[in-house]
Amino acid sequence: MSADAETTVTVTPENIRELHAGGRRNFYAADLGTANLYGADLSFADLSFANLRAANLYGADLSFADLGGADLHGADLGAANLHAANLHAANLHGADLYGADLSFADLRDVTMDWNSHELIGERIRQAATQIWQKQVAAFVLAGAREDGWCWDFYRENMPKDWLEYALNTMAPWVKDGDGAPEILRERVVTP
């Protein structure tokens, strides 16, 4: 197949694994909404601006992938490897990130899922400059393993200086309509 013919192949949920295994990495703006990509190896793939809404990416390897601007609303990213992935401006609202590895992922301007301990914990960890701040991130991540750990639990059980740090760190990430809890919305400064 010529290089020109290869670039015109339509990416579908049925052929993306084969295309990636064959060396293709560019899946820019692909429409993969509701795709079953369970355990897929999509490391280093360009999925920027892709529609992955409600896709099953459970256990997928997305390490070093470019997911900038991708719509991952409602996607299952449980146990996915997102190490060093570019998630800049991605929509993660409603995404299941339970057990996902978000270490060193670019999380600038993402639309948050405020119920994801993994996402919140990684955001706090990336902002941390002192050991105790990293402990705050670990405390939040521990909440993913426990039933009932939520914003009210943190307000009542987290040391006050830790809580203040977590809230002040997360407040700038609140966006209109993203479902952020009231405890964070109270801290948002409006111009």
Image: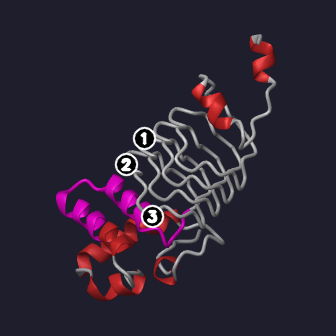
Q: Quadrant of residue 4?
A: top right
**Callout in the foreground (2, 3):** 3
Mark 2 and mark 1 in contact? Answer it, CB < 8 Å.
yes
Mark 1 and mark 3 in contact? Answer it, CB < 8 Å.
no
Magenta region, residue range: 112-139
- Label 1, label 3: how many angstroms apart (C-alpha)? 17 Å
Looking at the image, residue 177 sits to the left or right of residue 157; the answer is right
Horizontal and vertical percent for residue 185?
Answer: 52, 78
**Disc 1 element:** loop
Q: Which amino acid does label 1 sit on?
A: Ala
Q: Residue at x 41, y 51 (%)?
A: 102
**Disc 3 element:** loop
Q: Nearer the viewer, residue 133 or 57?
A: 57
- Label 2, label 1: how many angstroms apart (C-alpha)? 6 Å
Q: What residue type is labelled 2?
A: Ser
Horizontal and vertical percent for residue 157?
Answer: 27, 85
Q: Name the residue under label 2.
A: 103
Work out whether mark 2 precedes mark 3 in sequence or the reverse, and give the earlier one: 3
Crowd band around label 1 with a 10 angstrom C-alpha radius: few (<14), some (14–19), many (20+): some
Q: Which residue is drawn at 31% across and 76% down?
A: 163
Work out whether mark 2 precedes mark 1 in sequence or the reverse, and give the earlier one: 1
Q: Where does the C terminus fall, quadrant-wise?
A: bottom right
Q: Name the residue under label 1.
A: 84
Q: Residue 98 carries which label?
A: 3
- Label 2, label 3: how many angstroms apart (C-alpha)? 14 Å
